[in-house]
Image: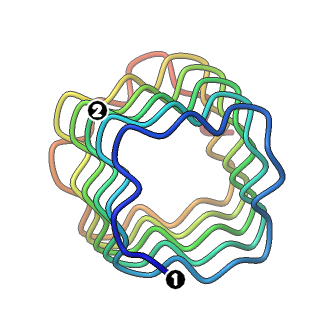
Amino acid sequence: MRDNYSGVDSSDCDMSALVLTGLNFTGSNLTGVDLTSTWLTGADLHDVNLTGSILTRTKLDNASLVNVNLTGAYMHRADLTGANLTSANLTGAFLRGTNLTDVVGADLTGAILE
């Protein structure tokens, strides 16, 4: 498996239950992608469009989510421990039960936390 997926367009794909630890997705279009139970620990996701994506139980611990668009993403019980969310757009993102321990730079304005 290659380790650089920067700039790919994988919108509306089913990428659930994959192990994608430490991979580079910089600038990719992952709009509407199903990432349920996918491992993205330490992945580089800066400038990625994840609008409307499903990230239920997704492991994003220590991932770089700088300037990522998570508008309307469904992130129930995701693990964002230690992730960098500087300049991320979380408007309308559903974060119920999501682990936000030691998250860096997160602006939760407009996110749904209940």
Q: Residue at x 56, y 33 (%)?
A: 9
What residue is shown with label 2? 47
Q: Nearer the viewer, residue 3 or 34?
A: 3
Q: Residue at x 79, y 33 (%)?
A: 12
Q: Residues within 10 Å of mark 2 (few under 14, many from 20)?
A: many
- Helix, strand or loop under label 1: loop
Q: Nearer the viewer, residue 25 or 35?
A: 25
Query: Which quadrant would residue 86 be assigned to in this image?
Result: top left
- Helix, strand or loop under label 2: loop
Residue type at mark 2 is Asp
Position in image of residue 69 (x %, y %): 43, 25
12 relative to 95 in the view: left or right: right
Against 64, is 113 above or below? Answer: above
Position in image of residue 51 (x %, y %): 60, 24
Q: Residue at x 33, y 64 (%)?
A: 4
Looking at the rendered image, the quarter that the C terminus falls into is top right
Gap between marks 1 and 2 measured at Cα: 22 Å
Query: Which quadrant would residue 43 be assigned to in this image?
Result: bottom left
Q: Residues within 10 Å of mark 1 (few under 14, many from 20)?
A: few
Position in image of residue 26 (x %, y %): 29, 45
Q: Nearer the viewer, residue 15 or 55?
A: 15
Query: Which quadrant would residue 82 be assigned to in this image?
Result: bottom left
Residue type at mark 1 is Met
Against 60, is 114 above or below? Answer: above
Q: Residue at x 59, y 36 (%)?
A: 30
13 relative to 87 in the view: left or right: right
Q: Nearer the viewer, residue 75 or 23?
A: 23
What residue is shown with label 1? 1
